[in-house]
Image (cartoon, rainbow, N blue to C red):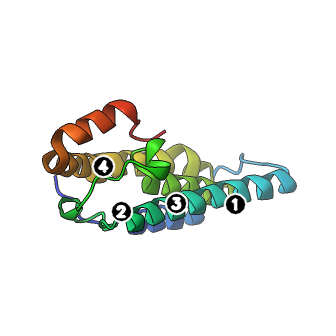
Amino acid sequence: MKTKIPPPLVALIVMLLTFLSRDYLDIFYLHPHLQRTLFLLFLVIGVSVIFLATRQFKISKTTVNPLKPETASSLVTSGIFRRTRNPMYLGLTSLLISFSIYFSSVFGIIIYLPLFISYITIFQIIPEEDAMNKLFSNDYKSYCLKVRRWI
């Protein structure tokens, strides 16, 4: 399988679906202060993780383009990549959680978030892992043994 749709676009589609489903199953009630706090917490975590990952790619002078993982010039294993192999997708997931909380969308949490994680894993992460395995072979295999795919 080849990567086709940019992950940020997939995340935007999920955010739109979350927004559109905000009025269904109105059982997701949080106190307004708690809702705002959780929204901001997950938003800041998501933006920070994406920023740190992008910064690490730039420091390593390799591609950030998720549609062409085979063009990577180096294997990034430092910084946030010591904790997760896919911080960009983890950051997007955190953003999706924050928007689900903001819109009080049960569907966002129980349907769209698992669909996003499944889609990204199957159509983005696995092809990226195949490309990294071809490019960096034993170094990548060793890295995979030390660091989890998500968290």
Local SS, label 1: helix
Q: Which residue is mark 2?
A: 60
Q: Are marks 3 and 2 in contact (CB under 8 Å)?
A: no
Dot placed on the residue nearer the N-terminal end, 3 or 2: 3
Q: Residue at x 30, y 68 (%)?
A: 65
Q: Are marks 3 and 4 in contact (CB under 8 Å)?
A: no
Q: Give me the C-alpha separation between circle 1 and circle 2.
A: 35 Å
Q: Which residue is mark 3?
A: 52
Percent across and percent down for residue 85 are 39, 45
Q: Nearer the viewer, mark 3 or mark 4?
A: 3
Numbered circle sitting on residue 125: 4
Q: Amino acid at mark 2?
A: Ser
Q: Nearer the viewer, mark 3 or mark 1?
A: 3
Dot placed on the residue nearer the N-terminal end, 3 or 4: 3
Q: Is residue 97 above or below residue 150?
A: below
Q: Are marks 4 and 2 in contact (CB under 8 Å)?
A: no
Q: Amino acid at mark 3?
A: Leu
Q: Which residue is mark 1?
A: 102
Is residue 150 rendered to the left or right of residue 45? left
At label 1, counting other C-alpha atoms closer than 10 Å, the crowd grade (few under 14, some 14-19, many 20 or more) is many
At label 3, counting other C-alpha atoms closer than 10 Å, the crowd grade (few under 14, some 14-19, many 20 or more) is some
